[in-house]
Image (cartoon, helix red, strand yellow):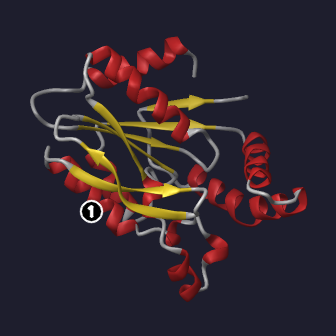
Amino acid sequence: MNAENLTATANKICSLVTGSSRVLVAIAGPPASGKSTFAEALAPEINKLTNSDTSTVLPMDGFHLDNSILDQQQTRQRKGAPHTFDAQGFVDCVKRISATQSEIFVPVFDRQLDLARAGARRVLATQSIILVEGNYLLLDQKPWSDMYDLYNYRIYLDVPEALLTERLQQRWIDHDHTPAEAILRAESNDLPNARLVASCRLAADQVISSEA
């Protein structure tokens, strides 16, 4: 998204603020669609427009189940699929943030360590615009769909599968996988997850398409 469109989206979100209630924005899309990058660019743009630290990012990835739990469940090879998250815990966290303006601590996923760090990010009491980003925010399956009505605005990042494949393979290569291992990881887990996100999603208020 170019700077002009980023500003337009930020302005739209800012216009949703009324009274003291928090505004929750869902930023959804398949793995490697650029959700984190987009959210981390959008938050400071909103803060610039409001001239305050009013926006922050809540990443869904902080609710990855620990590898030890996945090993017990024999699901580690599918890490990143919907059933490998503490989905209900994430839903409860979003509901809590929506219902209160008190300070809340949330977990953040550390890709280098491959684990979630508890209480690694603060949602300040003064932050009224929360950008929630993750693969399954618009997934038409419970408990994920229980959050749909909590969002004041929903954005979906639509990226062609060929481009996702290229990005996913490079992601694994950057994590010291061989090209063959990277292809296997992408095709056995990431791309099935991406297809689920694309084929089983609820409606978005804004769809951002990317070709490059």
- Residue sticking out furthest to the right: 180
84, 16: nearer the viewer? 84
Q: Is residue 179 left or right of residue 6?
A: right
Q: Quadrant of the N terminus?
A: top right
Percent coordinates x, y for residue 196 in the rendering: 60, 58
Which residue is denoted by mark 1 in the rendering?
92
| Image quadrant where residue 161 sits | top right
Q: Quadrant of the C terminus?
A: top right
Residue at x 54%, y 88% (from the top left corner): 72
Percent coordinates x, y for residue 105 in the rendering: 27, 54
Q: Secondary structure at mark 1?
A: helix
Q: Is residue 173 left or right of residue 198?
A: right
161, 91: nearer the viewer? 91
- Residue sticking out furthest to the bottom: 72
Which residue type carries mark 1?
Asp
Residue at x 68%, y 59% (from the top left corner): 190
Q: Is residue 5 left or right of residue 209?
A: left
